[in-house]
Image (tube, grey):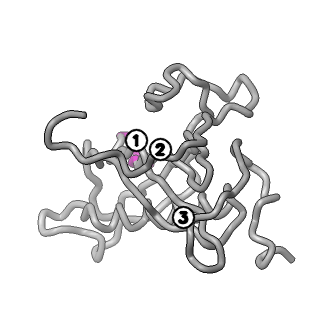
Amino acid sequence: MQQGRRPDPRQDPAVVPCSDMDQQQHRPDQHDPQHPGAPAPEMNFYTRKWVRPEDLNANGTLFGGSLLRWIDEEAAVYAIIQLGNGKVVTKYMSEIVFVSSAREGDIVEIGLVATRFGRTSLTMRAEARNLFTHRSILTIDEVVFVNLDEDGNPAPHGYTDITYARDRVPAAHRS
């Protein structure tokens, strides 16, 4: 371990790469050091947010805290669907890299993709980009959510692959 670095809080003994997708949707995943070259699905950008005056910092650009709030909320929704449980919590976010900004009136797209399923966790990669320019605004290599039981304790979820159907929507929310 490098001097001055804390131990990795995301250790989960049953980590498997996501690889159940159709081959045309795969690309080499350079962001998974445990499984270099392991196939992962393309990132999808489903959520869009309009940058409004209340989202701006003193510089007149998108406040990073607003963007992180949007990403955390979208990641929670993604985790709920992937894990089939409405009780999930954010455990960890890796280094957050701001690479550009957005201004009032821009539309920001938020993309997420699952990169690993642990025994009780789900790890995702996130990116926010400008809809108009397609320039990346922010990247986060790892966002980890933990599945909880009724008492708020980490609980195994039993999944190892990504779903694009709504078959895992928590039972309490199915019609």
Q: Nearer the viewer, residue 139 or 170?
A: 170
Task: Give the alpha-carbon distance from disc 2 to disc 3, as whole Å.
Answer: 13 Å
With respect to residue 94, does 25 lie above or below? above
With respect to residue 172, does 40 lie above or below? above
User: Which residue is the extreme one toward the right?
Assistant: 175
Q: Main secondary structure of the magenta part?
A: loop
Q: Are marks 1 and 2 in contact (CB under 8 Å)?
A: yes
Residue visible at 64% across and 72% down?
A: 149
Q: Secondary structure at mark 3?
A: helix
Circle 1 is placed at which residue position?
141
Q: Residue 48 location in percent, x, y?
A: 50, 59
Q: Secondary structure at mark 2?
A: strand
Mark 2 or mark 3, earlier in chain:
3
Query: What numbered label is drawn on residue 76?
Result: 3
The magenta-colored residue range is 129-135
Residue type for callout 2: Arg
Q: Quadrant location of residue 21?
A: top right
Mark 1 or mark 2, earlier in chain:
2
Query: What numbered label is drawn on residue 125?
Result: 2
Residue visible at 56% across and 76% down?
A: 152
Residue visible at 18% across and 68% down?
A: 57
Examine the structure image and report whether residue 114 is included in the region drawn in magenta. no
